[in-house]
């Protein structure tokens, strides 16, 4: 198993993982899949200085991905690192892949002079296991997200 920064030539592998994530999550799969937007976000994550994207391979098979970006708050110039995508394929969860992906993300954040790091655990996939996973890496629960579903528009 190897984890590395995503390269342009591997965007199709990242797209595959993003699509698997989208199909699995009961939260985000209610939104229409947009191939072009997903491609653009992945490509931008490769080229933008304040973004990162790492992919995990087992042999030549993509098995995990993490994407994050440096952000600043409304009331401060202090920066934090936020991850909006962390995914490990179902049959590889519980291995070290997720931890290794998060550690690569942390290394990126440490190089960017950040104050802290944030994950939103909101995919609806194994929520309790996800919370316990992040707690095991010294993350703390800091509030919650609220959501109200509106009628889906075509």
Image: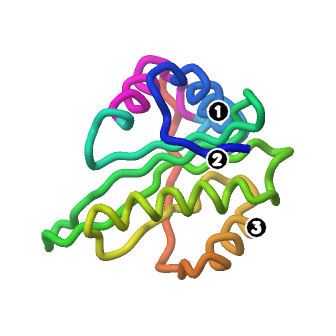
Q: Mark 3 highlights which residue?
A: 129
- Quarter of the figure that contains the N terminus: top right
- Residue 59, quarter of the rendered image: top right
Q: Secondary structure under badge 2?
A: strand
Disc 1 and disc 2 in contact, CB within 8 angstroms: yes
- Separation of residues labelled 1 and 2 (CA atoms): 8 Å
Placement of 89 over or under 80, stated as above or below: above
Judged left or right of residue 96, residue 11 is left
Q: Nearer the viewer, residue 130 or 94?
A: 94
Q: Which numbered dot is residue 87?
A: 2
What number is the disc on residue 17? 1
Q: In this view, does 51 lie above or below 145?
A: above
**Count of marks placed on residues:** 3
Q: Is residue 73 found left or right of 101 in the rendered image?
A: left
Residue drawn 29% across the image and 70% down it: 114
Residue 138 location in percent, x, y? 57, 81
Residue 29 falls in image quadrant: top right
Label 3: element kind: helix
- Quick one: label 1 or label 2, which is nearer the N terminus? 1
Residue 14 screen position, x and y as percent: 57, 30
Q: Where is residue 46 in the image (x, y as percent from the top left)?
A: 38, 34
């Amino acid at each position: 198993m190897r984890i590395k920064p995503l390269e342009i030539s591997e965007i199709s592998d990242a797209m595959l993982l993003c699509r698997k994530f989208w199909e699995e999550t009961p939260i985000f799969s209610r939104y229409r899949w947009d191939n072009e937007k997903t491609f653009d976000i992945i490509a931008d994550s490769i080229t933008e200085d304040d973004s990162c994207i790492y992919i995990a391979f087992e042999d030549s098979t993509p098995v995990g991905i993490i994407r994050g970006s440096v952000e600043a708050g409304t009331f401060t110039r202090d920066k934090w690192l936020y991850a909006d995508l962390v995914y490990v394929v179902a049959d590889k969860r519980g291995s070290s892949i997720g931890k290794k992906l998060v550690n690569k993300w942390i290394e990126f954040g440490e190089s960017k002079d950040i104050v802290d790091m944030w994950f939103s655990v909101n995919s609806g996939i194994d929520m309790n296991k996800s919370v316990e996973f992040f707690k095991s890496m010294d993350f703390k629960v800091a509030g919650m997200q609220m959501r109200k579903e509106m009628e889906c528009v075509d």
